[in-house]
Image: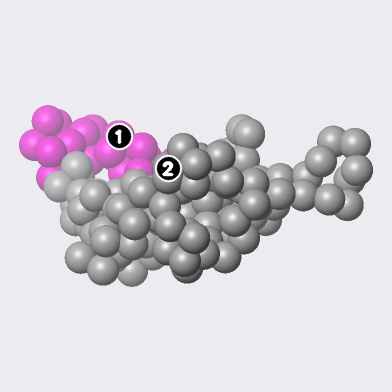
Amino acid sequence: MEKGSFPWVIIAIGVVAYAAWGILGLILAALGMAALYGRSIRTHPRIRHTGWGSCKGTGEVRSRLFRWTFHKCPKCQSGRLIRYGAGHWGTQPIQAEYKRGRRARKRAKDEKRWRLSCGGLGAAHMTG
Ligand SMILES: [Zn+2]
């Protein structure tokens, strides 16, 4: 899901369920959503890095002065991220990748080389 494109259909289903069956309908709708969400984080575990202060999915942070230059975006993996939900409740491999990515980015930041590293996780391991 891209930020700014909230799935309003979820709200609509909740309202309709509540109108039809009251609180029980709302609970059932919520359970249905949870099940769909659980499936979604397995089938679509990744998102583009978008939103305020992001690289807009490019993986590049441009210089304000020299517009053709950039450094690697420190907050994502070449413009891609693993969803929060997938990183916490997804499949084991995606959770492992999520943790590895977060650790690698944190270490690159601590070592003040996040602007330089360009090979992502691989480079982080080689230089570390
Ligand atoms: Zn980014």
Is 25 magenta? The answer is yes
- Is the residue 98 above or below the residue 10 in the image? below
**What's the amino acid at mark 2?**
Lys
Residue found at the very far front of the displayed protein? 127
Disc 1 marks which residue? 15
**Toward the viewer: 17 or 109?**
109
Disc 2 marks which residue? 106
Q: For mark 2, does the 10 Å Cα neighbourhood hold few (<14), some (14 to 19), or many (20 or more) residues?
A: some
What secondary structure predominates along the stretch shown in magenta? Answer: helix
Does the rendering let one see residue 99?
Answer: yes
**Toward the viewer: 5 or 64?**
64
Residue 57 appears left or right of 12: right
Q: Going 42% across and 63% down the picture, which residue do you hit?
A: 125
Q: Going 36% across and 49% down the picture, which residue do you hit?
A: 103
Q: Going 42% across and 52% down the picture, which residue do you hit?
A: 104
Please give the range of residues in magenta.
7-28
* Image location of residue 95, percent across then percent down: 26, 59
What is the quadrant of the C terminus in the image?
bottom left
The mark closer to the camera, 2 or 1, is 2
* Image location of residue 59, percent across then percent down: 64, 54
Q: Secondary structure at mark 2?
A: helix
Q: Secondary structure at mark 1?
A: helix
Could you tell me how far apart the alpha carbons at marks 2 and 1 are, in whole angstroms? 42 Å
